[in-house]
Amino acid sequence: MIRTPLRPLARILAARDRGQNPDAIEQENLAQRHAEMASKSRQQAEGRLLVLGGFFVCAFLTIGARMGVMATSEPHEPLAYTAGAGIAMQRADIVDREGRILATNFETHSLYAQPPQMVDPHAAADQLVTIFPDLDRERLIKDFTGKRKFLWIKKKISPEQKQAVHDIGDPGLMFGPREMRLYPNGSVASHVLGGAGFGKEGVSAAEVIGVAGIEKQFDEYLRDPANGNAPLELSLDLTVQAAAEQILDGGMKLMNAKGATSILMDVHTGEVISVVSLPDFDPNDRPPPPTSGFDPSVSPLFNRAVQGVYELGSTFKIFTAAQAVDMGLVNENTVIDTRGPLRWGRFAIRDFRNYGNEMSVTKIIVKSSNIGTARLAQQIGVESQREFLDDLGMLTPTPFEIVEAKGGKPLLPTNWSELSAMTISYGHGISTTAMHLAAGYAAIANGGRYVSPTILKQDGPKYGQRVMSERAAEAGRRMLRKVVTEGTASFAEVDGYQVGGKTGTADKPKPQGGYYDDKVIATFASIFPSHDPKYALIVTLDEPSIFSHGEERRTAGWTAVPVASEMVRRLAPLLGVRPQVDPEQVTAITLTSN
C-alpha cells in the first residue's frame, strides 16, 4: 500500500518560496486521508448490512411460506401418521372369471375433531351420539373439553351421516377424504375375498391393506402401482358362486346342520369355480376374530373349505380301490374276503351291516365295506399307501392361494402302522380338508393326473404329475358311478348328468378325545358327468340330522347327497354342461323301405 506523506517536501519548498504557510498543506492532506478512511468504512458497513438484510429476508420468506402451508392444510393425527411416509391410496379391483366386480374402491369420508376450535362441545357430543348411537357421550365430552388437539371420531361415514354432521355446524368437526374397500355383492364369496382394513392413516388419506383371504394373500400385487391397476382375475364364477351359496344354505337349514362347505373344481385346470363355507359374513363389515379359548369353528370367519380338518370317512375308499387296481393287485371284479369282524390285535374292524363273506372290489365300494377296503390296504402295504396319498397332496396343506389354506394341515398318525393303513383306507385315522378331497377326486376324473387347486383364472389345463394310470382312473370312475346307480348315493342321480360319487359319514371327534355317538361329519364327493368328467363337487355338512321314514338320519346318503344333487341340477346348466338325454324308443311306427 502506498501512503501519501502529510508534508511532501516538493510542495513544502514551493510554498515557502511563495511565502505560504507549510502547515496548511499538512492539514489539507490529513483531511483528505480521513475522508478516504470514512468512505471505505461506510462501504464496508453497507455491505455487511446488505448481507444481513438478505439473510433476514430469506428467513422471513421461509417462515411465512411454511405458515401459509400449515394454515391452508388439515392437521394430521400424530399417533396414526408418520411424517414423510407416503400413503398409497390406489388398490386394484378383484374380478371373477367373467370380469364382474368382486371387490373395488369407494370414495367416502372420515370424521375428526379439533377440540380447540369447537364452539359448543356439549351440544356437539349430544348430536353426534344421535347420529352415531355406538359413540359414548361422556367419553366425547371428556375428549372435547380436555387437552387433546386432535380426535378421531369415525374413520368411515356415509354421505347421509356426513350431511347430518355438517348440519351440526360446529367448526371443530371436520371431514377428511377416504378411499375404502367395497364388496358390492355382500357376503358372496366372503371367505375367499377375506376383507381389507386401514394401514397408515392421515386425515387426508388412508392406506387400504388386506387383512384376510385373497386381499391379504395378494396384498402386494393389489397395492403395486406398477401393475397399472390391472384387476386380479379369480377363477370364481359369480353366478355359480351365488347359486351354490343359496343351495347350500337351504340344505344346511333343511338338514339341521351347524355348518357346511362345498367346493366345485374344474378337474382339468384345478380352477375352483365355487367355494362356499357356512356360516359366512359380510366383508364390508367384517366381524372381530374369536376370543382366546373360543372354538374357532363356531366363528363365521372360519373357512371350513380349507381350515376345517376332518376325518372324511368312506370318501377315501375310492383312493384305496384305485391304487390297488393301479398296482395290478386287483381289478374291478376281483373277489375279496369280507368276513367280519376283521381283527388286528385287540382292535376289530366292522361293517355298517353284514354284506356277506365275499364281494368284488366294485361291490366293496358300492356297499361301502370297511372290511373289504381294509383287506385291500393290507395288500397295498403301508409305505405304498403313504406314497400314493402324498402324491395326491393329502399329507401337506393345499397350495390354494388364500392365507387361511396354510392352516389346513392334515392330521396324520404318529406311527403309520399296518393298523393305521387299514383305517386310513376307509377314511379314519387321517384328517384332511374338503379342498384336499376335491383335488383327489379331480385326479380320478381327469385320467390320473394331479391338478393343484387354484383360485386364479387359468388359460388351459394345468396337469401335474401322474398319480395313477388311466386304467385305474377309469375303473375308479365306473365304481363311483355305480355307487349312485346301485349304492349309498342313489339320491344323487340327476337326469342327463350321470353323477358319480362316494358318500362318507365319519363320527365327529370330541375336543378332549374320543368320538360323539350322535354327531357326524357327512360328506359326498362327486364328479360329473361321469362318462366325460369336467367337474368335481364336494359337499360336507357338520352335524346334520333329519327325521325321515320314521327315524332320525345322519348318514351322508340322507343328508349331503340330496344337497349335492340339487347343486348339480342347478349349477350344471350355468356351467354350460349340456344334459345327455337317452333317445326314447319310437313306438307304433314301422319303418319300411321302398
Image (spheres, grey):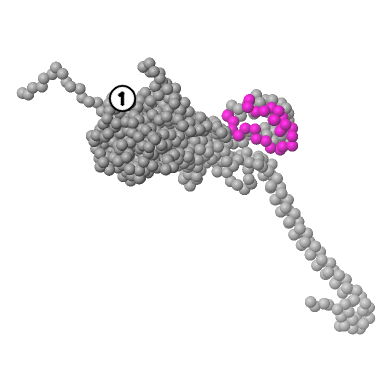
* Residue 379 to residue 13: above or below: above
Which quadrant of the figure contains the C terminus?
top left
- Name the image quarter holding residue 425: top left
User: Residue 183 in the image: x percent, y percent?
Assistant: 49, 32
User: Residue 560 in the image: x percent, y percent?
Assistant: 38, 26
User: What's the amino acid at mark 1?
Assistant: Ser
Q: Is residue 405 visible?
A: no
User: Residue 552 in the image: x percent, y percent?
Assistant: 40, 20
Q: Residue at x 20, y 24 (%)?
A: 583
Residue extending farthest to the front is: 346
Alpha-carbon neighbours of circle 1 within 10 Å: few (<14), some, or many (≥20)? Answer: many
- Name the image quarter holding residue 399: top left
Q: Is residue 237 left or right of residue 10?
A: left
In magenta, the rendered stretch is 132-159
Which quadrant of the figure contains the N terminus?
bottom right
Q: Residue at x 71, y 54 (%)?
A: 58
- Secondary structure under the numbered disc 1 in the rendered image: helix
Residue extending farthest to the left is: 594
- Name the image quarter holding residue 557: top left
Q: Residue at x 50, y 42 (%)?
A: 219
Compare residues 213 and 255 and report the one nearer the observer. 255
Q: Is residue 138 left or right of residue 503?
A: right
User: Residue 389 in the image: x percent, y percent?
Assistant: 36, 42
* Residue 28 to residue 524: above or below: below
Compare residues 432 and 573 and report the one nearer the observer. 432
Compare residues 161 and 221 and report the one nearer the observer. 221
Magenta stretch holds residue 148: yes
Magenta stretch holds residue 495: no
Q: Is residue 360 visible?
A: yes
Residue, disc 1:
490
Compare residues 472 and 275 and report the one nearer the observer. 472
Q: Residue at x 40, y 30 (%)?
A: 506
